[in-house]
Amino acid sequence: MQYEGIVYRPPSEAQSLIIQATIGCAHNTCVFCSMYRGKKFRVRKMEDIKADIVEGARLYGRYVSKVFLADGDALAMTTQDMVKIIAFVKQQLPQVTQISSYATAQDLLEKSLDELQLIKDSGLDLLYIGAESGDNQVLHSMAKGVTAEQLAQAGIKAHQAGFRTSVTLISGLGSRQRLKEHALESARLISQMQPEFLGFLTLMVEEQTPLSKLVQQGKFQLLEPDEVMEEMELFLQAVDSPGTVFRANHASNYVNLRGTLNQDKERLLNQIRQARSNTSYKPEYFRGL
């Protein structure tokens, strides 16, 4: 099997067969992200993708129940090609129960509802959407290329097409200046999107990103653990998304939180308050991306 560059996938896809359908990210300008900086975005040749699926089935077929289509922008492919790839996955790996990919808001809004329904009906059923924030000022400063309104529209459209969605937010992305706005506007966004899954990372700045320069210049202030928990408390108090599976147990998080909204909100809030009271946070040397 061939794979160009470092493999990036959601934590829940650790046991999945990863097939690189596209290389890199079509947007690739987010200030905080270094994942695809060294890659020029392009769609791989159909024959190369199929060859990897055949080899993956031969090598790992009996162990595979999930397939993840990488890189960061698989949904940027034409609808016709995406349907062909999914059909080929199902032909070669008939036992697979889930096929998923990342999906940008731009991709979801560009495709028609009929196209998205066709892709869903072919077998792609879970989309990972990196929202990062619901605050338009934060989205603009981080060069996400979309507004909170567009993110909400994209999530709603994905549900209309029948997809399950998993949305990611990043604690601390609003800096100290936008802590409250980032928390409350992100809660408003999730309340609109109503995703099946919600994951929170906590910001960690990588040296090769534009954000690193902003931190060094004093233009962006990183949050202390207490402030991250303050932000999370504000978010949980405001969010209204019944049934959403909530996780903030990534290696980057200072406190591991997991539950289901809205039923576990009070338990999660009490866990945050206890952590703040005891300053019982994960040490920096245990945090990672």
Image: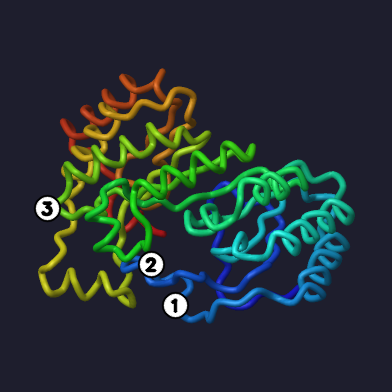
Describe the element under mark 1 as helix, strand or loop.
loop
Residue bearing mark 3 = 177
Q: Are marks 1 and 2 in contact (CB under 8 Å)?
A: yes
**Residue at image point 24% right, 37% down:** 184
| Residue type of the residue flagged with mark 3 | Gln
Give percent across and percent down for residue 281. 26, 43
Describe the element under mark 2 as helix, strand or loop.
loop
Q: Nearer the viewer, residue 273 or 29?
A: 29
Q: Quadrant of the C terminus?
A: bottom left
**Horizontally, is 235 left or right of 286 in the view?**
left
Structural crowding at the residue carrying mark 2, measured as other residues with C-alpha within 10 Å and reported as few (<14), some (14–19) or many (≥20): some
Residue bearing mark 2 = 33
What colouring does the structure picture have? Answer: rainbow
Residue bearing mark 1 = 37
**Residue at image point 65% right, 48% down:** 116
Structural crowding at the residue carrying mark 3, measured as other residues with C-alpha within 10 Å and reported as few (<14), some (14–19) or many (≥20): few
**Residue at image point 36% right, 46% down:** 149
Give percent across and percent down for residue 256. 37, 38
The Cα atoms of the two marked residues, 1 and 2, are separated by 8 Å
Which image quadrant for residue 269?
top left
The Cα atoms of the two marked residues, 3 and 2, are separated by 20 Å
The Cα atoms of the two marked residues, 1 and 3, are separated by 27 Å
